[in-house]
Image (tube, grey):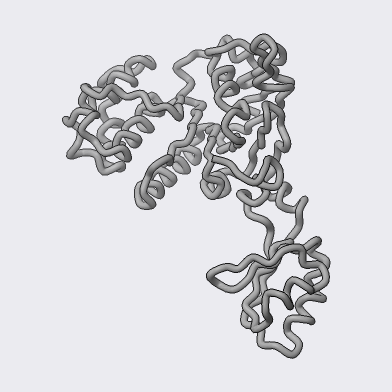
């Protein structure tokens, strides 16, 4: 494992922000850390970055204390953005890269590559304050990894992006992973977590509700989303054995089942005596599981 947190706790007087938290991240993977606001994600990031000390527990990188880690091996994109508004785009990238021990000569090909890839070449001499929010976000993302860190923390990298730029950044992050970078990723947009991460940790009030493989998490609930297009009415569907809830969708209905074992009997019932255009059983989405685990709403 590249990064390991073992029984990590962080207390502030009478408040416990992180409570006996343990998880591990494999080298070269994107690992998700999710939770509501105030769940302890930012505190966890700060302890990993050695900006705050743990109250109890250990954090190790490649079996060595995180305290001894060369800071230049880390990259961090915080949720609160922090580029310099009066500084030109390419100057920002050289500045942040040189802070991490790289020379301008080493940085130049990387700066040129990422400005082109993120469609920022024409903006390289522009001051950051003149850029759109999305372009500012792209600049700060590049700044977080321009020094080619071994370990990168990304906190809400897609916030406020349009779908085109979101896909552009998503592709770049997956390429960084494929090149061997280890990434800790956090977002309130569960579809992004589901697309990027095979493994994750769900936090609630500083405690881990689950840590491990996303598919295993889904299998705990089973295939209890039954999507159907049928001529039957909502009251008729609600009365079927095994159906807990009927949700009207643009494409028909989603029936939330008590258990996936009701599926075969429901297929027989729905296909008998009434036209059924669609019948598909699937796992809950991560967004649905998140709401079940931590509450009905999240920001």
Q: Which residue is drawn at 19% across and 36% down?
A: 123
Relative depth, front residue between 166 and 271: 271
Q: In which quarter of the image is residue 247?
A: bottom right
**Residue at 64 percent of width and 84 percent of height:** 231
Q: Nearer the viewer, residue 299 or 171?
A: 299
Q: Residue 232 at x, y = what percent?
A: 68, 81
Q: Is residue 189 left or right of residue 198?
A: left
Q: Is residue 288 left or right of residue 261?
A: left
Picture layout, residue 207 above or below residue 56: below
**Where residue 289 sits in the image (x, y, percent)?**
67, 49
Query: Residue 113 in the image: x percent, y percent?
Result: 29, 37
Q: Quadrant of residue 79?
A: top left
Extreme-front residue of the structure: 235
Using the image, determine if residue 134 lies above or below residue 246.
above
What residue sits 44% from the left and 45% below the top? 170
Residue 181 x %, y %? 50, 32
Which of the pair 84/59 is nearer the observer?
A: 84
Identified at 76% across, 87% down, the residue is: 272
Q: In which quarter of the image is residue 89?
A: top left
Q: Can residue 97 be seen in this view?
A: yes
Q: In this view, does 207 lie above or below 68?
A: below
């Amino acid at each position: 494992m590249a990064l390991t947190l073992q029984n990590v706790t962080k207390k502030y007087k009478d408040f416990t922000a992180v409570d006996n938290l343990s998880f591990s991240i494999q080298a070269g993977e994107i690992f998700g850390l999710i939770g509501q606001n105030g769940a302890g994600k930012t505190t966890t990031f700060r302890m990993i970055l050695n900006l705050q000390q743990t109250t109890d527990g250990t954090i190790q990188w490649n079996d060595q204390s995180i305290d001894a880690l060369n800071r230049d091996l880390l990259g961090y994109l915080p949720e609160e953005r922090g580029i310099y508004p009066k500084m030109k785009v390419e100057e920002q990238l050289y500045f942040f890269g040189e802070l991490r021990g790289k020379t301008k000569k080493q940085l130049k090909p990387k700066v040129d590559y990422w400005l082109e890839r993120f469609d920022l070449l024409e903006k390289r001499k522009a001051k950051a304050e003149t850029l759109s929010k999305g372009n500012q976000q792209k600049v700060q993302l590049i700044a977080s990894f321009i020094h080619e860190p071994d370990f990168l923390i990304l906190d809400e990298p897609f916030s406020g992006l349009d779908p085109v730029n979101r896909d552009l950044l998503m592709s770049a992050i997956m390429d960084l992973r494929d090149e061997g970078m280890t990434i800790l990723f956090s977002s309130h947009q569960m579809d992004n977590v589901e697309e990027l991460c095979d493994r994750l940790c769900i936090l609630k009030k500083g405690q881990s509700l689950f840590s491990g493989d996303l598919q295993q998490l889904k299998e705990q609930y089973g295939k209890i989303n039954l999507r159907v297009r049928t001529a039957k009415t909502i009251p008729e569907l609600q009365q079927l054995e095994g159906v807990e809830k009927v949700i009207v969708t643009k494409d028909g209905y989603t029936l939330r089942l008590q258990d996936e074992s009701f599926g075969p009997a429901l297929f027989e019932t729905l296909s008998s005596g009434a036209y059924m255009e669609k019948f598909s059983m699937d796992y809950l989405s991560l967004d649905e599981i998140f709401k079940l685990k931590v509450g009905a709403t999240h920001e």
